[in-house]
Image: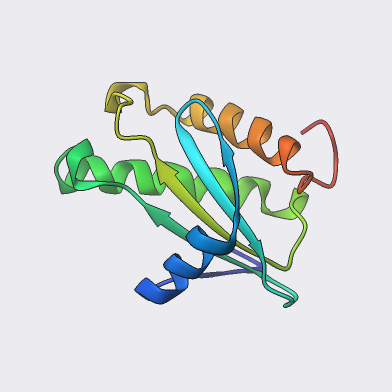
């Protein structure tokens, strides 16, 4: 990830979740907060209720890879937290579904530099 670091501490997540702007998609909810830096911070959270560690980590890898591919198209200077929806089945977690969700959400939030990816 070129312009990205990760949120690791609980207080970092809480700050984005309480003060950030909320956008929802079919599979993922995203909270975005401006951080006044030249790069993005991302955090990924998948609930224990979704499944065991192997399944949760697979979802995190898919989210991270989709973000990496769209990273050059996204404006920098934001904290972004991705939350997987608990009520969605893990079998629906495909690369293309998550990519469509990302494009729709980032278009809603006006973070994409281009309208078409």
The N terminus: image quadrant: bottom right
Residue sitting nearer the eye, 102 or 87: 87
Q: Position of residue 77 (x, y in %)?
A: 72, 68
Residue shown at the point (35%, 41%) measured from the top left = 59
Judge whether 100 appears above or below 12 on screen: above
Extreme residue toward the left, this view: 52
Left or right side of 17 for 39: right
Left or right side of 4 for 29: left
Q: Position of residue 35 (x, y in %)?
A: 67, 72
Extreme residue toward the right, this view: 114
Residue shown at the point (76%, 49%) measured from the top left = 111
Judge whether 13 appears above or below 104 on screen: below
* Residue 103: quadrant of the picture: top right
Judge whether 30 appears above or below 104 on screen: below
Q: Position of residue 56 (x, y in %)?
A: 26, 44
The C terminus: image quadrant: top right
Q: How is the image coloured?
A: rainbow
Residue shown at the point (14%, 43%) measured from the top left = 52
Left or right side of 89 for 31: right
Q: How many numbered marks does the figure carry?
A: 0
Residue shown at the point (50%, 69%) measured from the top left = 15
Q: Position of residue 47 (x, y in %)?
A: 26, 46
Residue sitting nearer the eye, 13 or 37: 13
């Amino acid at each position: 990830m070129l312009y990205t670091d990760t949120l690791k501490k609980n207080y970092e997540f809480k700050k984005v979740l309480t003060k950030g702007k909320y956008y929802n998609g079919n599979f993922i909810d995203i909270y975005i907060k401006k951080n006044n830096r030249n790069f993005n911070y991302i955090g990924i959270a998948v609930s224990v209720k979704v499944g065991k560690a192997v399944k949760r980590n697979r979802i995190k890898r898919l989210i991270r890879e989709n973000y990496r591919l769209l990273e050059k198209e996204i404006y920098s200077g934001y904290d972004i937290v991705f939350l997987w929806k608990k009520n969605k089945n893990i079998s629906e977690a495909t690369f293309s579904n998550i990519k469509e969700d990302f494009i729709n959400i980032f278009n809603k939030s006006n973070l994409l530099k281009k309208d078409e990816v």
